[in-house]
Image (cartoon, rainbow, N blue to C red):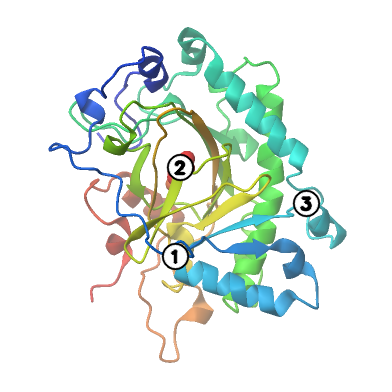
Amino acid sequence: MNLESSVSVPSVQELAFQRPEKVPPRYVRDEDGDDVIGPYPSDPSLRVPLIDMAKLVNADTHQLELQKLLLACRDWGVFQTHTLYQELIQQKLVNHGVSNTSIKNMENQVRRFFELPLQEKKRSAQRSGSLEGYGQAFVTSEDQKLDWNDMIFLKCLPIQNRKLDLWPQNPPEFRETLERYSEDIREVTIAIMKFITMSLELQDTQISESFREGLYDIRMNCYPPCPEPERVLGIVPHADNSGITLLLDCADFSGLQFLKDQKWVNVEPIEGAIVVNIGQIIEVVSNGIYKAPEHRAVVNKWKERFSIVTFCYPSPDMNIGPADQLIGEGKVAVYKKFTNAEYFSKFFNRKLDQSFLDMLKYDQ
Ligand SMILES: O=C(O)CCC(=O)C(=O)O
Ligand SMILES: [Fe+2]
């Protein structure tokens, strides 16, 4: 069995509805009662960088903000950004973008989907041999520890990748909202990728343009309240295998954390802002200058949290290896070049305890 399908698991929402006093053993990460959540940074000034798209598109402020973007991608691998809409349209960088309405609509639809009775949600349940649909990802055995999370994962773009039989018909506006949202996110991704490649001083736009024909897979997460939040994880630490990932945090408290200098740093949700993190493909393309950061989700004792996560991939025609301009003339290639198909085959056939990126490196 490879990682393209998952063992079916119980719904965490249903479990939480029963208001248990304790977490069932399958979700407990610490065997001896230790807190699995720490360590948090002692330095409260450690904050995920904020990048202002308006400054990136304004000629007077462009250089300084691009420098900030470079440091964010190099030292953190993640940043938050808002003002994704008006400025980009004015600068004709996008035809449309993610407006606050598009964000609000999507959040509402996801909330309403997870509020449905289990039987109704199960109409979109994962089928065997596929990760798409309502269920859980990367569970390969009955004794594997489980995340405190329910999710629905749908491939959204290109349109021919959609498995509409798994797209919820309830709530009734879910489908058209997701269609619109994925197209909006694609526009924004191309714009963000332009700035990311610019910050690497890559002159041509081939990489950012390859996201026009790219793949956009959306994972909607629900983290129910948990009686013993310090003993479980919403999502285990991982790096994304995407090009970049755009995450919408639908909560007014933090749950997402990034690893920075061996400490977990909370992302404080900002209304209308998106969290952008570097995925492993851009780590490889940048020859390791930019890092795909480790991140995880923790859960709350009283409150449910949702997130809407878009994994953005370049066109399947694009080979995955360090950009030509970043190697040669004394600059050593850290990563090998693979075809797109080879890259994904390695990803889905990796062992869960193996570092995926190490498999792509030249032997040191
Ligand atoms: O929901 C979150 O905050 C994190 C989700 C995530 O990292 C993922 O789905 O890959
Ligand atoms: Fe992730």
Q: Amino acid at mark 1?
A: Glu
> Which of the 4 quarters of the picture holds residue 317?
bottom right
**Residue hosting label 3:** 85
- Say which of 50 and 202 sits in front: 50
Q: Earlier in the sequence, mark 2 or mark 1?
A: 2
In this rendering, position of residue 335 left or right of residue 267: left
Q: Which residue: 34% across, 31% down?
A: 5
Quadrant location of the C terminus? Answer: bottom left
Badge 1 density bin: few <14, some 14–19, many ≥20, Cα 10 Å? many
Badge 2 residue CB within 8 Å of ligand 1: yes
Q: Classify mark 1: helix, strand or loop.
A: helix
Q: Position of residue 231 (x, y in %)?
A: 26, 36
- Say which of 74 and 341 sits in front: 74
Q: Position of residue 121 (x, y in %)?
A: 50, 15
- Say which of 189 and 37 sits in front: 37
**Residue hosting label 2:** 255
Q: Position of residue 34 (x, y in %)?
A: 19, 42
Quick one: which residue is furthest to the right in this view?
Answer: 90
* Residue 50 visible in image: yes
Q: Earlier in the sequence, mark 3 or mark 1?
A: 3
Q: Classify mark 2: helix, strand or loop.
A: loop
Residue 283 is labelled as 1
Q: In the picture shown, does residue 199 fall above or below 269?
A: below
Q: CA distance from mark 3 to mark 1?
A: 27 Å
Quick one: which residue is furthest to the left in this view?
Answer: 32
Q: Earlier in the sequence, mark 2 or mark 3?
A: 3
Q: Amino acid at mark 3?
A: Tyr
Badge 3 density bin: few <14, some 14–19, many ≥20, Cα 10 Å? many
Q: CA distance from mark 2 to mark 1?
A: 24 Å
